[in-house]
Amino acid sequence: MKMTPSEPLVLDRVSASYGNTEILKDLSLDVRPGELVSLLGSSGCGKTTTLRLVAGFLTPTRGSIRIGERDVSRVPVHKRNIGIVFQNYALLPHLTVRDNVAFGLKQRGVGNTERDRQAMEMLETVGLTGLADRLPSALSNGQKQRVALARALVIRPPLLMFDEPLSNLDAKLRVEMRVHIRALQKANERTAIYVTHDQEEAFAISDRVAIMDAGRIVQLDTPEVLYRRPVNEFVARFVGFENILPMQVVERRGKIVTAALAGGATLELDQGEFGIIPDHFLLACRPEGLRLAAPGNAGVPVTLGMRTYLGRAYQYQCDSDAGPLIAHGAVDKAHPGVGTQAVLSVAPQQCAILPAAKS
Amino acid sequence: MNRKWLPLLLTVPALALILFLLIYPVGDTLAESFLPLDQGWQRYVAFFSEPYNRTVILRTIKIATITTVLSLIFGFIAALFITRCPAKYRTPLLILSVFPLLTGAVVRAFAWMIILGRKGLLNNLLLNLGIVDQPVPMLFTSFSLVTGLVYLFTPLAILSLVGVLDGIEKDVLDASSSLGANPLGVFTQVILPLAVPGLIVGGVLIFTGSLAAFATARLLGGDRQAIMPTQLYEKAMVSFDWNTAGIIATVMVLVTLVAILAMGKLARRFNPATGG
Amino acid sequence: MGRKVHPLLGISAGLVFLFLIAPLVLVLGAAFNDATYLAFPPQSLSLRWFERVLSLQNFMDAFLVSLTVAISATALALLVGIPTSYAIVKHRGSFPSWFSSVFFLPLLVPEIVFGFSLLKTVIVALELPVMTALIAGHTILVLPYAVRVLGASLSNFDFSAEEAAVSLGMHPLKTVLAVVLPNIKAGILAAFILAFITSLNDVSVSLFLTGPGVSTLQVEVLTYVEQYFDPSVAAVSVLLMAITLVVMVVLERSFGLSNVVK
């Protein structure tokens, strides 16, 4: 199969609106050749709009979109040469699996025999050779997903786009398919955009993830960086920092900073690990970063609430002077009941420092 | 009472009506046209050796076919527009489409008599513009008949097609464009094949409808453009020749049957996903 | 589908809608025209053709016949149609797949063949009175419309509500009356209206079944148009359109046209 080189995708200060509502504002994004970037966010954040802009279903009001050297901002959809995998698969219901895969080749004027050969080869890659003559209505969701994938890959587009492709599959298949998608994208060296609202999925599949909110990219980084060092409270909450505590620095000794919580409890943090810590900041802690300890230990004093069993640990709803907190406790001890006074010790390696909310 | 028989029992009254008032009488008409076999055969031979009868049958098929094709084209255009226009225009346009359907065939044929008559609107217009210097006979021609029938059945075509066009997912069209199909390609390779079930349902209803459109045929086709429904009525109620009327009825049923089977076959060729 | 509208599509659709509506507007104009001949636009307006129509005894008689037939046939079709639709929608699995098409046969048999066969085989043989004959014929004619609309309405009904009522101790028969029927009220109304209009507008079947002194309005109007081509027919048409329009507004308000279309 002939290889088209993979190309970079550049969005340069792109804006878009539906009627009078501006959905995207000056959005810029660089995707390197062969890289997979996820657009992650809740519904209405602009991730699907971004995908539709790149695909050509929408026209930007300002800014430009380039694939490689080509400015495609005003190029009609059918000339953009982008392979899209849709959320509901969007298979052509009147065509067989084979003809669905061959559809794009047919539009490109590829001859009958060659079309069939390439379609069958691609079906083999996705493991559906035996189903070539079935109609889409006779396939399971997982099989439809594979056809959609084969159909998008077979035209060798410089850019692949996925619009929440796994959201209609059950949990096990979802994990299986995302490995499959990632493998095919890598093997074919295609640049790819992957839209999802599932944080775990985005982290598992991507080279980099763009977290979006209200039509902007809030943070674009590798999953590893996003997971440990979110830039603000929005990203922190999105990647699982469920506790956000406002803190104030009370003492600085070399790299070690002592900060106090609203309730008065203090905590020592190392600037060698977190970088420069401002006087006022937010401390973001994962539940596993707040460990249950006996009263009298150093930490945040709380009243325990409901307990749920997670397997590796118990999770506690707690009440503190700084508001409700979620903490973990070990499973192997006898456990205090609802209403017991306790202390949460903070594990700094499970925490992140965020700028204080602007007031 | 046996629970298994309950569903069937509920349908018995309707089944009985259909059986006694539709299947039995129509079946009887068909059977009687052939019986007794030797005489039946002679009657058919006599019927078909009359050139006028052959003309009427061929004319009926021709008119019904043209009507079906034109109504479907008009209906397709309107239905496509209805499914694509902004949502707020949808209901008004649907009402506009359905309204003529709900007025009688006589009224609608009458409207075209006003337009196409010797002193009708169109002739007035042509005379005033000096395009012709005496009225063009337009009434009681195949033109007026087809116009009246297409007018009668276009709303039906719209209704049959709005449903299927609505059923085409937007993503499927988007996917086709993204795979490189230009707007014409999307239309011919995706929209049209997916509309086939609606085209078939509409086509069958319009074709059979054309075979039954007595009022339209009488008022806009007249004796000069006699088609099977007018001829059947003539034989049955004016000359009381029920033998011939029975033959005409049988031919009409056969033509309908062939048309339905042919359209079903056509459907599966263009869209293998069409059921049945 | 909700995609962009090509200007060419807009223009041709506009022409189709014009084709659909313009002739009816002409009829409207002719009905209010003072002149004795059919002309458009009308020179001066008057209601004389309406007065004339209302004074024509055979039109009024025929209208009463049509009304009686339409109401009776529709009621009968609903009476047998509701249990039928209920059975074929709820117990889809207990019937062979072709079963429901039996109830759509009247749509596939050319009406004129049906009318003639009914006359020859049932009416003449049983010497049925004209009114009974008309009601019998029209019941068959409107049955498919009733079954189709009721079926669509029942398909949207969640039968687990019925099971829930029975599980709470309600008698199954009472459940049908108290739970199922109220939920398909709109569908029943829509079916009634559609069947009613279909019966009111029929020509081809009635043609064979009318008898001495008893005729339907459409058949009368047809005969009248063939003999006198004057604007009183336009006036009748306008009266019929007015009835239709009122009925359609009720239909849209109560059920939503889009649901009937399916």
Image: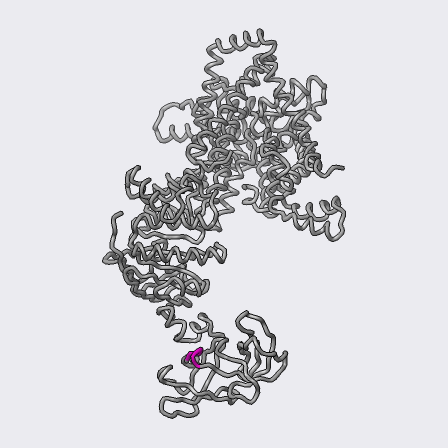
Query: What residue occupies the far left of the structure in this picture?
Result: A69
- Left or right: residue B236 compared with residue B265: right
The residue drawn where x is 64% and y is 40% is C91
Estimate the x, y position of residue B178 in percent, counting from the top left.
Answer: 35, 49
Task: Indicate the position of residue A82 as horizontal and vertical percent values.
Answer: 32, 52
Instruction: Between residue A85 and residue A150, name the one nearer to us.
Output: A150
Q: Can residue C43 be seen in the rendering of this structure?
A: no
Residue A350 belongs to the span the image colors magenta: yes
Q: Give the residues in magenta.
A: A348-352
Where is residue B32 drawn, in percent x and y?
61, 14
- Residue A352 in sight: yes
A76 vs B39, left or right, is: left
The chief SS type of the magenta part is helix
Residue drawn at x 38%, y 81% as measured from the top left: A274
Q: Quadrant of the N terminus of chain B?
A: top right
Query: Compared with residue A95, is residue A194 higher up or lower down, i.e. above or below?
Result: below
* Residue at the front extreme, as displayed: A332
Q: Position of residue B195 (x, y in %)?
A: 45, 38
Image: B130 above or below B251? below
A269 in magenta: no
